[in-house]
Each structure stands twice: as C-alpha cells, then as structure tokens.
Image (cartoon, rainbow, N blue to C red):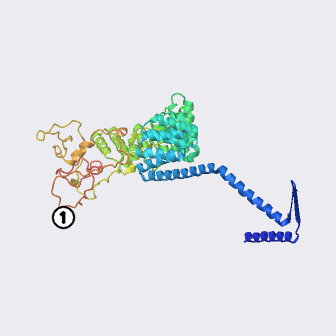
Amino acid sequence: MIRVALFLIFVGALALGVAWFADRPGDIAITWLGYRIETSLMVALAALAAVVVVAIVLWSLLRFLLRSPEQVSLFIRNRRAMKGHNAISRGLIAIGSGDAHKARRAAAEAHRLAPNDSLTLLLTAQAAQLAGDAPDAERAFRTMTQRDDTRLLGLRGLFIEAQRRGDGETAQRVAEEAVQTSSGVHWASQAVLDARCASQDWAGALAALERMKGDLDKADYRRQRAVLLTARAQTLAETDRDTSRDLAREAVKLAPALVPAAVLAGRQLAEAGERRKASRMLEAAWRVHPHPDLADAYADARLGASARERLERVQALAAKTPAEIEGALAVARAAIDARDFTLARRALEPYVAAPTQRVAALMADIEDQDGGDAGRARQWLARAMTARPDPVWTADGVISDRWLPVSPVTGKLDAFQWKVPLEEIGGRPGPVIEMAPGAAPAELVPLPPAIDDEPSEPDPDEGQPASSLPASPIQGSPIPASPLAAELAAASAPAPKPSEVPAAAPGQTVPEAREPSKPDVAKPDPAKSAAPVVIPLVHAPDDPGIGGTGVEDNPEGLAAPAASGWSGNGRRPD
C-alpha cells in the first residue's frame, strides 16, 4: 500500500512538472560552426532524453559484446559444476545403500566433472573402501592431506586404513600428526593415549589425557587420570618412592574408590611413619569399596604388629561395613593367623550355608588346623570346587591375580573391574538341594568322612580305572561307580588358580550343567515312606553341602550313615 501511494505521488509530481513547463514555453538557440538551431524548450528536452536512451542502449550492447566470452565460460563452468555435484550426490547415496559399482561409476564421473572438489575426493575414497580397494582409498586420503581444508579428513582415513591392515606403527604416526595439526581432535588424542598406555609410557599418556580434558566428562577425566597416576606410581615405587607416594595420594584424591591407589598410598605412608594418614585413607576407601587388599594393607599399617594386633585392626575395619562379606573374610583370615579358630568360625557362620569358594577354602583351612580333621578339610575343598565364584580382577574375558591399568586384549584404559567372572552374561550358580524336613537319611547318599589319597587298582573286568573313592566305612566295601562318584572324583581334582581359569569369550554363554543319567531303579512308594519326593532339577546343583549329594534317590542302595558318620546336612546325628 505504501509503495502504491509513493508511485502515485511520483506520477503526480512528474505530471505537474510537465504541465508547468508546457504553460511556460520558451525558445532555445544553439549556434555552432556557422549553424544556428532554434527550437522550443519541450522539444529540446525530448531530444536530450532520446540521446540519453540511445547512449545507454549502445553502452549496454558494447559491454555485452566485451563480456560475452567470460559469461559463456562462467555458464559452462556452472553447468559442469552442477553436473559434478549431482554425480557426487548419486555417489554418496549409492555408498549409503551399499552399491559399490554405482558408487565407483559416480566417483569417476565426479572426478571428470569436478576434479578439485573436496567432496569428489571423499566420494572417491569411500567408494574405494566400499569396493575393498585399499590402495585406491589410501591414494585419495593422501591427496586430501595435501590440502588445508581436507587435511584432518585425510589423516583420519589413513588412520582407519592402517588399523584395518594391522599396521599399528603407521596408525600411531598418523594420529600424532593429526594431534600436531589440531590438538582438539578426539580420535587422534584417544589413539595417542592408547598407544602411550600400550607402551607403558605413563607420562606421555598423562599428557595425551590433558589434551582430551575438554572433550571428556569431568568424572571420566578424574577417573582416567587417577588410573594413569596409579600406574606411574607403581612403576616408580622402587626407584623414586617420594614421587610414587605423591602420585598415589593424588590418585586417591581423584578417585577414592580406586583400590590399587589406596593400597599403594597406604603402604607407602605407613612405611614413611604416617600411620594415621594411612589408616584414614584406607578406611575411607574401605567404606566405598571393601576389598581384601585394603584389609591386608590396613593390618600392615602398624609395622611389626603381632598376629593378635593385626586381628584387632582388621576387626575394627570390618566393623565399619558390618553387612559386607569381605569384612568377614578378612576377620577370618586374620583369626586363622592368630590361631583363634572360634572367632574365625563365628565370622564365617553367616555364609557357610551357601558359601563362596573363598569361604569354603577358609573353612577347609580351619578344619585342617583346628584339630587336624583331614576328612572335613577335604570335604570343604571338594565343596569349594562347585561353590559360587568370588570376585576377581577381570577385563575383556581375562582374569588376573592383580590389578592392571590397561586390558591386555583391547588396550582399554581402566578395564579391570573387581567382579564375579561371567556375571554380565548370566553365569549364575544353580540352586542348592537341601534335605527336606523329616526326610529319611537313606534318601541322600552321604559323603564318606575321609578320602584316601592312594588311587584304587584298575578293574580287571571293565578294563578301566575304578572310582578313586575309598571303601565306604558304612558297608565296608567300595562305593560302586555311579554318577555321584564321577562327580566327587572330578571335585577332588586340584583346583586351578583363578588367574589360570580361561574365561569365556565375549558374546558366549556358559552351558548349563545337565543332570547325570541314573540307572533305572524302582521309586519308593509314597504310601510307605514319610519323606517327600525330591523333584529333579534341570541341571546338577553347584553346592550340595557337606555330606550331601543333591540327588533325589539312592540309586546304589547304600545303607544309612552310621552313628559316627556325618549326616546330609553336615551335623552329627543325635
């Protein structure tokens, strides 16, 4: 509306001007080179306007003729560039859809139409990667590194190609060059950090981590720095103890729950005479993450302490987390060293019903040292073979007897965790079969009170070794071969160390143990027996308990235990 009003005002002003000149006619006379020209004012103005219009037209025509070659060239270039971008678009779409042939054809067309376009180089490299042509892809990436706008992209591509062919040295060199080009590139800084950790260059790893500080979450940065400081402190523990102690203390401040840092700092502070600081540091770490190494370091914080003093210190530490099993295990170990077996039994009493491997091993140690009951000790050792596993240092399917800063498989920093192996894939122990209340003792096959170390003679009839179990003290004859005997023979084998147990590969599941086959025997008549029938489980139990077998019947026809034997629940009969 405003534009219409302005246009009307302009037209009206122009009409008024023309009318004003028409109402006031005048003459114009021009004398030049003997010629005299006389005309009116309106005619002279009209002629002047016509001359101006003709001049403008002539100048525009002349300029068009002068600039026509450039305009034609620009038109051709724009048309070629448009075709090149269309070819690049088709190629990128083909790469996304996985059509290698169409992508290579589009890349060739884009290279012909737009050879200097950065997207053409990217399309050529990705099309070669999709087709599996590594040399062509590397040539494209090397061309990118020669340009400022695509240098980092080319280095990234060379890094990936080096990793694909397993050339770690080249990959590391490319990553370091990328870091020098731009220190804010996360992938390059991470690659340099991983390389420094693999070579145990902890100072260089700390410098690489500092470059990544802006890209990491604050908690992740503090944790990774604490792990690197701990690794460097462990390296300097023998050569530069003061620096090692300072690094360990800084690591504890960054990550109080990092057990290796707290253990190292606590031991070094105790050796330096700062026992109170060591105790406070270990107590703080214990509250966050109870661990057997912390208990040992806390007990050793007072140099030259006796076994009884160590026990008192461990009891004080365990009292700070009364619901944790690690406290009970630490007290039991210290009590065994102090020859206080009553206290050791009392500490483990809440866990003997469903023990872990360490609980069963400690109970075997107690039985062996407290009275020398070798039979009970071996029963606990056999029970430890099928008991629930304890937490260990594990990372990427590898079990280690000590903490390591990086994984030996993937090289990942801070990969080792204190946890039960295979816990994340559902490797849980099966349920435990216990004797039902009121059940007759004859329904469960009892374990013998002792197992002889001497192997039995081969069976001449079968041609195979007989069961390694000794003669039954109940019947005075060897226990016949049965699935239970096979299980007990396997359980009596020496236990492998936790660090030697091969862990399942990631993605694999632990096969469930199946119930062993039993001979066809007549089932007891429910009307003649007051004991309930035990429903068989899908898999064999992991922990039948002392003297128990976890089977629902007596396929071998063994007699009930004698008065001097042990019943299925681990108690002497009244």
User: Is residue 526 positioned above or below 88 on the image?
Assistant: below
- Give residue 342's quadrant in the image: top left
User: Is residue 295 positioned above or below 423 on the image?
Assistant: above
Q: Position of residue 296 (x, y in %)?
A: 46, 38
Q: Position of residue 81 (x, y in %)?
A: 55, 50
The answer to whether 59 appears left or right of 197 in the picture is right
User: Dot 1 surroundings within 10 Å: few (below 14), some, or many (20 or more)?
Assistant: few
User: Is residue 68 positioned above or below 10 on the image?
Assistant: above
Q: Position of residue 260 (x, y in %)?
A: 49, 39
**Residue reaching furthest front?**
34
Q: Nearer the viewer, residue 402 or 334?
A: 402
Q: Nearer the viewer, residue 162 or 363?
A: 162
Q: Nearer the viewer, residue 248 or 24?
A: 24
Q: Amino acid at mark 1?
A: Ala
**Residue reaching furthest top?**
239
User: Can residue 226 be seen?
Assistant: no
Describe the element under mark 1 as helix, strand or loop: loop
Q: In which quadrant will I find the N terminus?
A: bottom right
Q: How many marks?
A: 1
Q: Nearer the viewer, residue 271 or 205?
A: 205
Query: Which residue has dot 1 on it?
Result: 527
The answer to whether 182 appears left or right of 352 in the picture is right
User: Can residue 171 be seen?
Assistant: yes
**Residue reaching furthest left?**
461
Q: Position of residue 282 (x, y in %)?
A: 52, 41
The answer to whether 320 appears left or right of 99 in the picture is right
